């Protein structure tokens, strides 16, 4: 009886292996293509989200720059009792009218302003700006009967919420910089002590602490011209700095500095260029956009004519090897530049009006 051999010949095996390799190569190619598409889409989404959030954070504060509650820049009388000329607390700019001051709503820089100790240091050759505004607390004056104290009704007490561990009373803490206004006049002062006085908030404005106040006694029956009537607003003043610095990941990030604390808010913001819209004919409409250096060269009071801000951001993806070749881009009117890596980059531009300057 003849033997019947079963199985595959060598040729058949080689053909099968070859077909298998072709199929595997196709599957692998599809996988690589899908992964590349996913990586690119994720990078695009991440960059767009970072750019959108960065503009949203800065836009919110720029719009409110110079806000003083019911006071406006046309009230004719805004003063400060804060001692010293440190930029951190010197919130007023002298206008063209002698002895009349206005709130330093926005100010741009190309280096860290004197009087601040930003940590980490700003990235070289990147713009930064400072916004001054009133917010976070809005309480009404109930008594102005003592020359060194204000009183207001206590509604909310947050235990241990202040930087020194004290309770935060209606959003107010000791050492806050505050604004009091009755819509006809306004004064910025240092709250040297904020405490609970039998159900009332007692706000002291003496000369103690840093920076302290001078004069230390004003208002009440002793100084009727400095008296703020019951119902006057008390708001918290803040100076907010937006700047670029190296983040915790070692890559550039957008940072916000407020209340002496710097916070990394968005990773991947590589560059920031800012120009300021200036009203040159008094119609409250920006006529020209200038850099901070150009406005400074025109005189310090020129900042009072700034009514809008144009933001330009260069945002990079968090992942490298996203694009097939190094991008070539032009940022803020510069010559075309080739990126040093394979990260995805996108430019965002937005123009924001300052509400207190457009009214």
Image: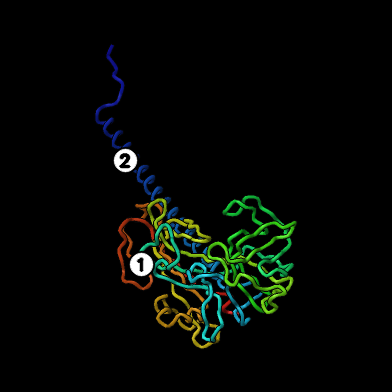
At horizontal 59% and vertical 69% (from top left) the residue drawn is 189
Image-based side of 193 in relation to 24, left or right: right
Q: Is residue 170 left or right of residue 308?
A: right
Residue at the (68%, 79%) spot, across then down: 225
CA gap between label 2 and label 1 equals 53 Å
10 with respect to 101 (left or right): left
Q: Quadrant of residue 64?
A: bottom right
Label count reads 2
Judging from the image, what secondary structure is the residue with disc 2 in? Answer: helix
- Across and down, in percent, residue 307 comes to 52, 78
SS of the residue at dot 1? Answer: loop
Q: Is residue 235 left or right of residue 265?
A: right
Camera-side residue of 324 and 331: 331
Q: Which residue is mark 2?
A: 22
Residue drawn at point x = 40 percent, y = 62 percent: 122
Percent position (x, y) of residue 355? 58, 75
Above/below status of 182 relative to 28: below
Of labels 2 and 1, earlier in sequence is: 2
Quadrant of the rendered image containing residue 143: bottom right
Quadrant of the frame with the C terminus: bottom right
Which residue is tagged 1? 125
Residue 170, position as x, y percentages in the image: 68, 59
Residue count near mark 1 (Cα–Cα under 10 Å), binned few <14, some 14–19, many ≥20: few
């Amino acid at each position: 009886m003849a033997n019947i051999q079963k199985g595959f010949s060598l040729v058949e095996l080689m053909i099968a292996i070859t077909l298998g390799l072709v199929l595997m190569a196709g599957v692998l190619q599809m996988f690589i293509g899908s992964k590349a598409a996913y990586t690119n889409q994720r990078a695009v989404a991440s960059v767009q989200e970072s750019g959108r959030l960065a503009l949203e954070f800065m836009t919110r504060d720029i719009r409110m720059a110079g806000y003083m509650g019911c006071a406006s820049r046309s009230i004719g009388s805004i003063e400060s009792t804060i001692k010293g000329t440190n930029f951190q607390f010197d919130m007023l700019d002298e206008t063209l009218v002698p002895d009349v001051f206005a709130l330093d709503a926005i100010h741009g820089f190309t280096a860290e302003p004197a009087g601040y100790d930003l940590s980490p240091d700003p990235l070289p050759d990147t713009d930064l700006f400072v916004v001054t505004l009133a917010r976070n607390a809005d309480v009404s004056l109930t008594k102005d009967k003592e020359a060194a104290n204000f009183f207001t009704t206590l509604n909310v007490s947050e235990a241990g919420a202040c930087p020194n561990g004290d309770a935060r009373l209606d959003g107010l803490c000791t050492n806050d910089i505050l604004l009091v206004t009755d819509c006809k006049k306004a004064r910025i002062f240092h709250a040297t002590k904020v405490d609970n006085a039998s159900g009332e908030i007692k706000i002291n404005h003496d000369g103690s602490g840093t920076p302290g106040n001078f004069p230390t006694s004003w208002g009440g029956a002793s100084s009727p011209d400095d008296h703020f009537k019951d119902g006057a607003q008390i708001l918290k003043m803040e100076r907010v700095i937006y700047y670029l610095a190296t983040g915790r990941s070692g890559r550039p990030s957008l940072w916000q500095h407020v209340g002496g604390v710097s916070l990394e808010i968005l990773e991947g913001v590589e560059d920031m260029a800012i120009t300021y819209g200036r009203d040159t004919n008094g119609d409250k409409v920006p006529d020209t956009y200038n850099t901070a250096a150009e406005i400074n060269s025109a005189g310090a009071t020129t900042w009072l004519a700034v009514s809008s801000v144009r933001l330009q951001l260069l945002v990079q993806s968090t992942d490298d090897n996203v694009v097939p070749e190094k991008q070539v881009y032009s940022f803020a009117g510069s010559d075309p530049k080739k990126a040093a890596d394979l990260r995805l980059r996108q430019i965002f531009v937005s123009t924001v009006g300052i509400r207190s300057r457009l009214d």
